[in-house]
Image (cartoon, rainbow, N blue to C red):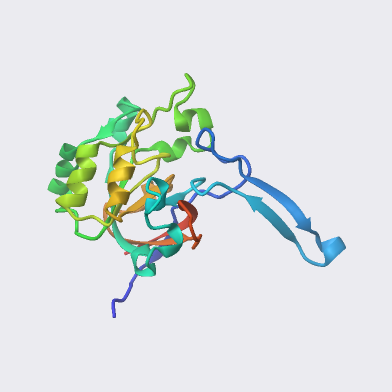
Amino acid sequence: MPTLSYSRVISLSHPIHSAITHWPGDPQTRFSTIATWDKDGYFLREMTVGEHSATHINAPRSFDPAGRDVGHIPPEQLILPAVCVDLRDSCKMNQEYPIQIADIHQWEQQHGSIPEGCLAIAHTGWQEKWSNPANFLGNGDRELHFPGFSEDAAEFLINQRQVAGLGIDTHGVDPGTSKTFGVNRQVLANNRMVLECLTRLDLVPPVGFTVIIGALPLVGGSGSPAQVLALLP
């Protein structure tokens, strides 16, 4: 049986509350008190949250009505080795930066080939913008502007590196200007993982850590908010 050895655990998920950043048109996150300590002897809230709100996982059902839902992702696929590609400098210069195959090759020159079966995470620096929705989504002009993977880079990672999925600290693995969600569609069509709105990526190493994805097993679900834990070596 595989074993895990780690020195530290870090949450890569944003806390969930009613003021979190939402994708335009997605339901607002709300909490309503159902029971109180004084009246009922215990405390209970009702929660309304979109399947793709906060730090979340996308399931193939997002774009394919016959695709696998989040409730049927095999549990062994929710524990993955991971790498983190630091692209902050490029994304700082271009808020719509499309991550290129050349970026991956440059990272591999320093850290070795991206291992098969890992989660490939892009650290764009967008996690720092999370508390300001207009900055995080870049939609001051009613359009979305944030970095993401190019379709060529996604195809390379899936077919040439056989990654288990893609993760990013923006609200999409596709650049914000995308109208087709081609990267999402490509990754999910291959039954791979998509994680969005990650955070604290500045605390993980480039390679050698493990992620555990606590997705809700929502039957029929297109995705789920997730507690993503990084186990550091």
Q: Quadrant of the C terminus?
A: bottom left
Q: Is residue 218 left or right of residue 119?
A: right
Residue 73 vertical position relative to residue 88 in the rendered view, above or below: below
**Which residue is the extreme one toward the front?**
66
Residue 17 vertical position relative to residue 4 in the rendered view, above or below: above
Q: Position of residue 37 (x, y in %)?
A: 81, 63
Q: Quadrant of the N terminus?
A: bottom left
Q: Position of residue 217 (x, y in %)?
A: 49, 63
Q: Is residue 39 left or right of residue 72?
A: right
**Which residue is the extreme one toward the right?**
39
**Which residue is the extreme one toward the top?**
141
Residue 209 vertical position relative to residue 25 in the rendered view, above or below: below
Q: Residue at x 46, y 62 (%)?
A: 71
Residue toward you, 29 or 227: 29
Residue 45 vertical position relative to residue 87 in the rendered view, above or below: below
Q: Is residue 185 left or right of residue 131?
A: left
* Quadrant in the rendering for residue 182: top left
Q: How many marks?
A: 0
Is residue 169 visible in this depiction of the protein?
A: yes
* Quadrant in the rendering for residue 35: bottom right
Q: Residue at x 29, y 76 (%)?
A: 2
Is residue 107 visible in this depiction of the protein?
A: no
Q: Position of residue 227 (x, y in %)?
A: 48, 57
Q: Position of residue 20 (x, y in %)?
A: 57, 41
Q: Residue at x 51, y 46 (%)?
A: 54
